[in-house]
Amino acid sequence: MRVLLALILSLAPVAAAAADCRDTTFEQASYTICEVTAGEDLRLFHSGPDGAYGSFRKVDQALEAEGKALDFAMNAGMYHRDLAPVGLYVEDGVEGAKLVTRDGPGNFGLLPNGVFCIGDGFRVVESRSFKADRPDCRYATQSGPMLVIKGELHPKLLPGSDSVYVRNGVGVSADGKRAVFAISNDAVNFHSFARFFRDGLGLSDALYFDGNISRLYAPSLGRHDGGFPMGPIVGTVVSRG
């Protein structure tokens, strides 16, 4: 009987794991993090038949046609006024916007910037290194600046900076098996945010997504941040219950 039960369980469909979202603190600042492990259905979203989704709700509605639901999500990179990605954007293997490697104004142009790549595992790669030896990414989004680069903080991030905002980004483990998405619940500067990834979470590479407009969708925490329409969105997908 036990053998039969084990066989039945082994043949039963397995629901995709949900992201692990939780609140935490680092140096008196509050953060919410969502951790995703390799093998979970993590995707990037930008446009549907009617144009840019712009919101978590519209992404979730689009997934309903697949019998799927959005489990966790956040904004995932900078965008122009028309919601088009500022830098590289790849969705389900299709490149929708080109890699940008020149320096320039604003946070995106504060080199080194980088690319978050979703393939067999997860990677955060400095943009010019990405161009020189492009990895195989089913999904990719470029943003900037890099926060942590192989265990070192971005050299232009200042400890005493008074430029403080609610910020969000992603860090990956050295083995590429974990991606941790973080949003500050308090206004923090770049240096503090970068140290949270490196010293608070122990991650060797991390990339800034955005600030001020940063938003999180985490139903497990009762959170659905609203606001102006967004460009790229990253999130995990699960079967709709």
Image: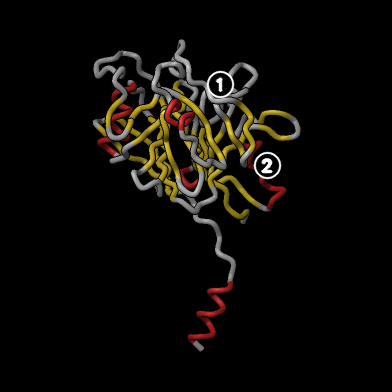
Seen from the viewer's position, the closer of residues 79 and 73 is: 79
Q: Can you tell which mark lies on residue 86?
A: 1
Label 1: state its secondary structure.
loop
**Residue 113 percent across, percent down from the top left:** 42, 24
Q: How would you rate the neighbour count of disc 2 (Cα within 10 Å): few for under 14, some for 14-19, many for 20 or more? A: some
**Residue 41 percent across, percent down from the top left:** 54, 50
**Quadrant housing the C terminus:** bottom right
Seen from the viewer's position, the closer of residues 209 and 69 is: 209
Seen from the viewer's position, the closer of residues 120 and 41 is: 120
Residue 90 against residue 174 in the figure, above or below: above
Seen from the viewer's position, the closer of residues 101 and 2 is: 101
Question: In the figure, is residue 98 to the left or right of 37?
Answer: right
Q: Can you tell which mark lies on residue 104?
A: none
Q: Quadrant of residue 21?
A: top left
Q: Amino acid at mark 2?
A: Gln
**Residue 18 percent across, percent down from the top left:** 49, 52
Question: In the figure, is residue 36 to the left or right of 85?
Answer: left
Furthest residue toward right? 49
Tag count in the figure?
2
Q: Marks 2 and 1, Cα distance to the nearest angstrom?
A: 25 Å
Q: Can you tell which mark lies on residue 61?
A: 2
